[in-house]
Image (spheres, rainbow, N blue to C red):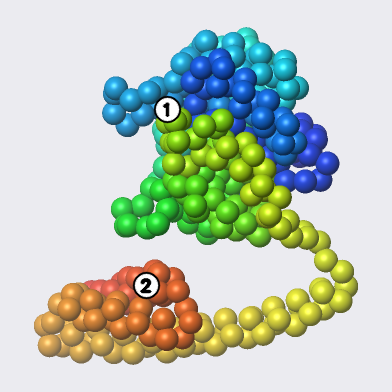
């Protein structure tokens, strides 16, 4: 994927004194009293750089709470006046942008359901032409890196340079303990492509439940993200939306104080040791590829044997056996079974491709 983004460094549009950016606030702005109380309790804890709140809530089915709209913006403007905290909200259409700017919102974000639709993103980009405001983009609901990158390219086309990514996890058909599977490799690949792009983790939407927030938040910091956006509510259990994934402002402060922020840079001695360990990894990786090449050579012979005996390429019972055996072996070796399962899915797909190639070559 070839792309280039012209990004204004995050520290030029928000001062965090070198600390990870923290965007905190309720999932939804429900009442004026709830917004102001939550905002002032966040301010009293002292950890937040920006306050967030949902003003318009896209819901899967009608009838659910879909946000308070413009009145909520009035409450947020008052919260900003009382606390001095900049405001961030989600926008999904040009009218949202117009109202957000009218009420002095400082940061906008594009939600996962919007990122997935290039037409909607383009409408937002067109509405933002000539506007100097930071815009954060959540990853699309499905793990499609091109859609995520495309949203930034559309914003760049509108002249927006204060941009950042929000990693909130991805929908997954498989059962997992998370509301949205983190799929960390997607965010890591985004950082590889665009190292200058701020990456902000959203542990609330990954977790779906407050008991998982600590481990996800620490993982986000361990991966050297630029910050986090976390939901907090004055009375989480009574929240009108996403109650199970929110913390009180005080509980969030306690959690944040327990997290360890790792060093992004290191000294000469550490660098030398790191270089030695990386050299070992490089050698092991080379051996891994040699083993894979040897495996594919056997696969090719297997394909020839199937071809000569008119046997179908895909043998489902064999695949099920491999899938179960490799996961069991992984546990015995101290590897995560899920990791090994995903790895062997890729290996199996390549084996199928290789055998199919052998089958077709006989017909040429």
Specify the label residue 341 is tagged with: 2
- Residue 62, image x, y percentages: 29, 23
Residue 88: x, y in percent?
Answer: 62, 27
Give the x, y percent position of residue 49: 72, 34
Residue 352 seen in the current view? yes
Which label sits in the foreground, 2 or 1?
1
Q: Is residue 227 above or below residue 153?
A: below
Position of residue 284 measured from the top left corner of the image (x, y, whole percent): 59, 85
**Residue under the image location 52 percent in, 22 percent down:** 29
Which residue corresponds to mark 1? 240
- For the C terminus, the quadrant is bottom left
Query: Which comes before the other along the chain, label 2 or label 1?
Result: 1
Residue 166 visible in rendering: no
Give the CA separation, mark 2 to mark 1: 38 Å
Q: Residue at x 54, y 47 (%)?
A: 203
- With respect to residue 34, does 270 lie above or below? below
Q: Secondary structure at mark 2?
A: helix
Residue at x-position 45% and y-position 30%: 239
Secondary-structure class at tag 1: loop
Q: Residue at x 66, y 47 (%)?
A: 254
**Callout 2 environment at 10 Å: few (<14), some (14 to 19), or many (20+)?**
some
């Amino acid at each position: 994927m070839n792309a280039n983004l012209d990004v204004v460094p995050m520290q030029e549009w928000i001062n965090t004194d070198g600390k990870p950016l923290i965007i905190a606030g309720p999932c939804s702005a429900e009442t004026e009293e709830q917004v102001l109380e939550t905002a002032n309790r966040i301010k009293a804890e002292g950890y937040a750089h920006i306050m967030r709140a949902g003003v318009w809530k896209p819901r899967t089915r009608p009838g659910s709470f879909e946000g308070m709209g413009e009145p909520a913006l009035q409450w947020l403007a008052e919260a900003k006046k009382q606390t001095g905290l900049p405001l961030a909200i989600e926008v999904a259409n040009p009218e949202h942008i117009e109202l957000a700017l009218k009420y002095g919102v400082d940061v906008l974000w594009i939600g996962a359901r919007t990122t997935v639709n290039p037409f909607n993103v383009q409408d937002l980009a067109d509405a933002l032409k000539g506007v100097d405001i930071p815009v954060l983009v959540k990853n699309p609901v499905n793990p499609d890196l091109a859609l995520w990158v495309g949203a930034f390219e559309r914003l760049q086309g509108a002249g927006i340079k204060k941009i950042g990514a929000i990693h909130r996890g991805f929908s997954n058909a498989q059962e997992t303990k998370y509301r949205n599977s983190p799929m960390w490799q997607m965010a890591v690949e985004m950082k590889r492509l665009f190292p200058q792009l701020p990456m902000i983790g959203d542990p609330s939407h990954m977790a779906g439940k407050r008991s998982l927030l600590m481990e996800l938040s620490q993982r986000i910091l361990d991966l050297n993200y630029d910050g986090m956006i976390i939901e907090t509510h004055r009375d989480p259990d009574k929240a009108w939306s996403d109650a199970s994934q929110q913390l009180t402002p005080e509980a969030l402060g306690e959690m944040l104080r327990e997290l360890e922020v790792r060093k992004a840079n290191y000294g000469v001695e550490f660098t030398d040791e790191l270089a030695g360990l990386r050299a070992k990894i490089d050698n092991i990786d080379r051996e891994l590829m040699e083993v894979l090449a040897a495996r594919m050579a056997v696969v090719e012979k297997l394909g020839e044997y199937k071809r000569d005996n008119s046997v179908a390429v895909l043998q489902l019972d064999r695949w099920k056996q491999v899938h179960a055996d490799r996961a069991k072996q992984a546990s015995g070796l101290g590897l995560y079974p899920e990791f090994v399962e995903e790895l062997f899915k890729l290996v199996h797909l390549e084996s199928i491709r290789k055998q199919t190639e052998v089958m077709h070559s006989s017909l040429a």
